[in-house]
């Protein structure tokens, strides 16, 4: 079966390449608006399923994988920063604190579907205003949930991680590979 990644994220593409199987990237155009009643812990999985379902509808002959990552601090989802002020607000909020990163995954194949989410805890160092200003002045934080990318310069903000590094990066690739093998799709 053809494998499709329903995400435009270059980080997810890089991680899926670890499976060493050919795949195609088709970005989902689904609505990513969350109902207010959705708990923060469930949002990533819900969006991952939506993304995968939208692409699977157009490609029913393929195995379609969708993913979404949320950063959660005090039950608030920190999305992608809208501007520099929003970026700095998020980084100040994360400074010196532990937060959750949840990546949801949706898999659709042959009329079936399965979803799961994986969670990691990330501890930030206490950040100075100068550190926050310098990071916010870079291009890195603006297309990433929580205003940081752990695989880039954002790694310098992180004191520690409990859980899968790749969950924080955007795709729990080891868990996904095991799931695909269990389903006979890999």
Image (tube, rainbow, N blue to C red):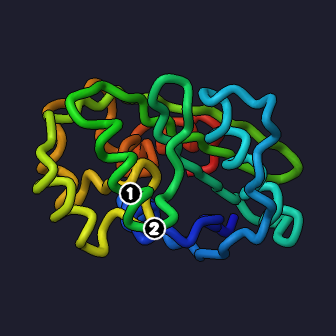
Q: Label 1 belongs to which residue?
A: 87
| Place of residue 84 in the rendered image (x, y in percent of width and height, measured from the top left) | 38, 66
Q: Secondary structure at mark 2?
A: loop
Q: Is residue 19 visible?
A: no
Q: Residue at x 20, y 61 (%)?
A: 133
Is 182 situated left or right of 59 in this image?
left
Residue 126 lies in quadrant: top left
Numbered-mark total: 2
Badge 2: few (under 14), some or many (20 or more) residues near its Cα, within 10 Å?
Answer: few
Q: CA distance from mark 2 to mark 1?
A: 6 Å
Q: Label 2 belongs to which residue?
A: 83
Badge 1: few (under 14), some or many (20 or more) residues near its Cα, within 10 Å?
Answer: many
Is 160 situated left or right of 34 in this image?
left
Q: Quadrant of the N terminus?
A: bottom right
Is 154 situated left or right of 120 in this image?
left
Q: Are marks 2 and 1 in contact (CB under 8 Å)?
A: yes
Foreground pick, 58 / 84: 84
Q: Secondary structure at mark 1?
A: helix
- Please, is residue 7 above or below residue 24 in the view? above
Which disc number belongs to residue 72? none
Foreground pick, 179 / 166: 166
């Amino acid at each position: 079966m053809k494998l499709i990644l329903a995400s435009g994220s270059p980080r997810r593409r890089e991680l899926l390449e670890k499976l060493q199987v050919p795949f195609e990237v088709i970005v989902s155009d689904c609505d990513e608006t969350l109902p207010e009643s959705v708990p923060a812990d469930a949002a990533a999985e819900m969006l991952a399923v939506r993304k995968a379902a939208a692409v699977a509808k157009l490609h029913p002959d393929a195995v379609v994988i969708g993913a979404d990552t949320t950063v959660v601090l005090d039950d608030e989802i920190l999305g992608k920063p809208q501007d520099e002020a929003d970026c700095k607000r998020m980084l100040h909020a994360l400074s010196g604190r532990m937060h959750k990163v949840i990546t949801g995954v949706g898999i659709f194949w042959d009329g079936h579907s399965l979803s799961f989410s994986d969670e990691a805890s990330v501890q930030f160092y206490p950040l100075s205003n100068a550190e926050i200003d310098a990071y916010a002045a870079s291009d890195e934080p603006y297309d990433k949930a929580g205003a940081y990318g752990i695989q880039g310069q954002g790694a310098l903000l992180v004191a520690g991680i409990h859980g899968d590094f790749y969950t924080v990066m955007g795709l729990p690739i080891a868990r996904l590979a095991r799931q695909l093998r269990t389903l006979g799709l890999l």
